[in-house]
Amino acid sequence: RFDQARFIPADAIFALTAQYQEDLSPQKVNLGQGTYRDADGRPWVLPSVKKARESLFEQGLNHEYLPIVGLLKFQQATARLVLGAELSAELGIKVATCQSLSGTGALHLAGLLLRACQKSPPKVYIPEPTWSNHHQVFGSLGFPCESFKYYDHERNDMDIESYYSTLERAEPNSVVILHACAHNPTGLDPSEEHWRQIAHLMKARNLFPLFDAAYLGFNSGNLDEDAFAIRLFIGEMNMEAGICVSFAKNMGLYGERVGCFLLANKSKQIAVNTQSMLEMLQRSEVSNPPAFGARIASQILGRDDLKKMWYADMITMSDRIRSMRNALYDHLVSLGAPGAWEHLIRQSGMFGFLGLSLEIVLRLRGLSSIIILTWRVKEKYHIYMADNSRISIAGLNEGNVEYVARSIAQCLQD
Ligand code: LMR
């Protein structure tokens, strides 16, 4: 029966975390998986989350099922948060909402719905590079996926012209995956002017914008700023659009899988139908979503005092990341690390995209014996970053940033 099963290599990001955990060196630095760390390198429970959790326990928790599409208060508050109070009130029930298993679950639900509503699955355009799971989610659902050039590795910058030309010749009715902000892995987003042009080109060819919104508020520290593109497409441009919201990063709720799929529909009647389809699709996949994380998020979004605390927490996280980005840049420059590093400070959000070769990345990991033999290694490093030299800047702190910069400089000088 399963003779045809293929062996699938482990997910690169999770495999890297496992490699890091096995390394016994006290010097080790994890710049792999995108999870926030505090100034001492520890996971951070946001004070707003802690308070919301306490208040939930005080209220007395039960363990009943949520409705199939999730906790209504959470869905409504998420729509208000992402679209802004004015636009969400204006659209009202034209927006279908469904709680999801974080951002991945929302992307998957979006895929299921798109597939169920079309005779054959439309083409999905995905920027290159992108978060690795985009291809898996849509590929595994049978969508034909096409990568388009987002980044110019020579210039270490966005390739906006390629982006435009992809949209100009894209197959009408296709889906385009858009990173709402803090593009993963490059840290480079379109400017407001670029977004306007992207929206115009997409509207002209009837392309469906599907936003992956995993870093709202976490990117700049200002949620309204980070939601600019979403509100532009749906509000100003009056476009049909899907938004896959995750609260993993901006609330630090990684393991609770708190997310929501929002769909801005063309009419109320279509929204009633898509809402009912989401309910059926969710029932057949997970029956109903997990309650605990959504209850925490709902407390935060629904209470002014907690919401204020949360906004301050997002500033704490984005400020620390920004200062570590600057510190890494300063050390690389002052140590004379070969190459130009300005791209690092042009980028924003959780990730830095360094532009190092795979050889250097593996050498920094200190694990490839073949490379070690041929490179006359003087020192073994313990720095873990993705193969494409994406670093999770949150893994840096005052205690390791110079070590990381020095190691990079040494590897490049050897
Ligand atoms: C990442 O890109 O490192 C994170 O979003 C974690 C993940 O699930 O891949």
Image: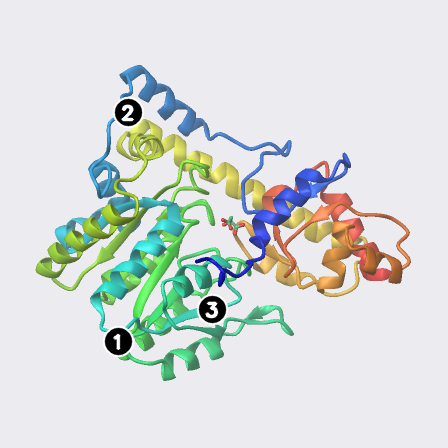
Is 238 above or below relative to 304?
below
* Category of crowding for the residue at label 3, using alpha-carbon neighbours closer than 10 angstroms: few (below 14), some (14–19), many (at least 20): many
Gap between marks 3 and 1, in whole Å?
18 Å
Could you say which quadrant of the image residue 363 lies in? bottom right
Report whether residue 231 is seen.
no
Q: Quadrant of the C terminus?
A: bottom right
What residue is at 33 percent from the left and 77 percent from the top?
A: 201
Q: State which tag comes first along the sequence, 3 or 2.
A: 2
Q: State which tag comes first along the sequence, 3 or 1.
A: 3
The residue where tag 3 is placed is: 127
Q: Secondary structure at mark 1?
A: loop
Instruction: Look at label 2 and name its amino acid.
Output: His
Instruction: Look at label 1 and name its amino acid.
Output: Asn
Q: Secondary structure at mark 3?
A: strand
Q: State which tag comes first along the sequence, 2 or 1.
A: 2
What residue is at 18 percent from the left and 61 percent from the top?
A: 265
Which residue is more in the foreground, 71 or 203? 71
Is 411 above or below relative to 14?
below
* Category of crowding for the residue at label 1, using alpha-carbon neighbours closer than 10 angstroms: few (below 14), some (14–19), many (at least 20): some
CB atoms of marks 2 and 1 within 8 Å:
no
* Category of crowding for the residue at label 2, using alpha-carbon neighbours closer than 10 angstroms: few (below 14), some (14–19), many (at least 20): few
The residue where tag 2 is placed is: 63
Instruction: Look at label 3 and name its amino acid.
Output: Pro
Percent across and percent down for residue 358 are 71, 63
Q: Secondary structure at mark 2?
A: loop
The residue where tag 1 is placed is: 206
Percent across and percent down for residue 360 are 76, 60
Gap between marks 3 and 2, in whole Å?
41 Å
